[in-house]
Amino acid sequence: MRSKFICVIAFLTLLACFQITSSAEEGKDGFVPLFNGKTLDGWKLAEENPQTWKVIDGQLVCEGPRCHLFYDGKLAPFKNFHFIAEVKTTPGSNAGIYFHTKYQATNWPKYGFECQVNVSHGDPKKTSSLYGVVNVADPGVKDNAWYTQEIIVKGKNVVLKVNGKTLVDYTEPDKQAAPSKQFERLLGEGTFALQAHDPNSKVYFRNLRVKKLD
């Protein structure tokens, strides 16, 4: 009888620990971290130039030739969601945040959309552009300063915000066709990917988190 009592106590203790752990992973607002701040666990590097990406002081840092870093964790795939990340660019840098994409070993991702990361790079499509679809000329942010990028997808609608301000509100037309064989740019479902664009760009990402929506 005593052994059964001890087993019950042990089970309840284990259950309590599990609930605490689950609460720690999912915040009160429903957002779940995508990056643990220490390792690339849950992420998969493309095969080209994997040395471009590093984890430094709780940040994902890209500096080097083109390489994409894909979220490969248990939360994928994503369809309707609210994504938030803090981003910091250095002068002349270019990067991106892909969504509804899928892993590629090389080249620019064909699937999904890119939320542009670019404050002072020569490309006229600046930060928070829905690249090649709805482009932003002035996002109102500066290099060497953190800004918050939000990506919200509900059905056929995409909203991109910087520091709480909506810069893009796009609704995909019914029966939209892919604009090219190179880039599909259609909503569906998939994962996230961070882009290292070129050897002269250095960009920082931190506090990546997501909440799935109905």
Image: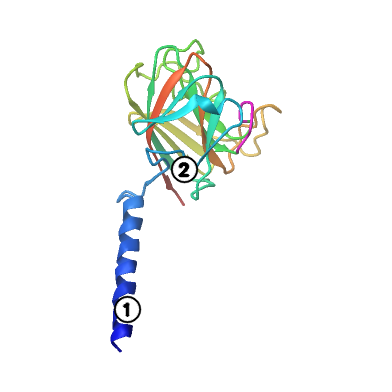
Position in image of residue 183 (x %, y %): 65, 28
Residue 14 relative to residue 53: left or right: left
Q: Is residue 178 visible to the viewer in this orientation of the structure?
A: yes
Residue lying at the far front of the rendered structure: 3
Q: Is residue 115 visible to the viewer in this orientation of the structure?
A: no
Position in image of residue 210 (x %, y %): 41, 43
Chief secondary structure of the magenta portion: loop
Residue lying at the far bottom of the rendered structure: 1
Q: Which amino acid does label 2 sit on?
A: Asp
Disc ID at residue 212: none
Disc ID at residue 8: 1
The residue sitting at 39% across, 42% down in the picture is 36
Residue 185 relative to residue 154: left or right: right
Residue 171 relative to residue 22: left or right: right
Magenta stretch holds residue 84? no
Position in image of residue 207 (x %, y %): 36, 36
- Among the 4 quarters of the image, the one containing residue 10: bottom left
Magenta stretch? 103-109
Q: Which of marks 2 and 1 is nearer the N terminus?
A: 1
The residue sitting at 46% across, 24% down in the picture is 62
Q: Please give the residue where the numbered disc 2 appears in the rendered image.
A: 41
Residue lying at the far right of the rendered structure: 181
- Among the 4 quarters of the image, the one containing residue 112: top right
Most foreground residue, 64 or 133:
64
Q: What element carries label 1?
A: helix
Q: Which amino acid does label 1 sit on?
A: Val
Q: Does residue 168 sit above or below 37 in this rendering?
A: above
Q: Does residue 33 sit above or below 23 in this rendering?
A: above
Position in image of residue 203 (x %, y %): 42, 22
Crowding at mark 1 (Cα within 10 Å: few <14, some 14-19, many 20+): few
The residue sitting at 40% across, 25% down in the picture is 204
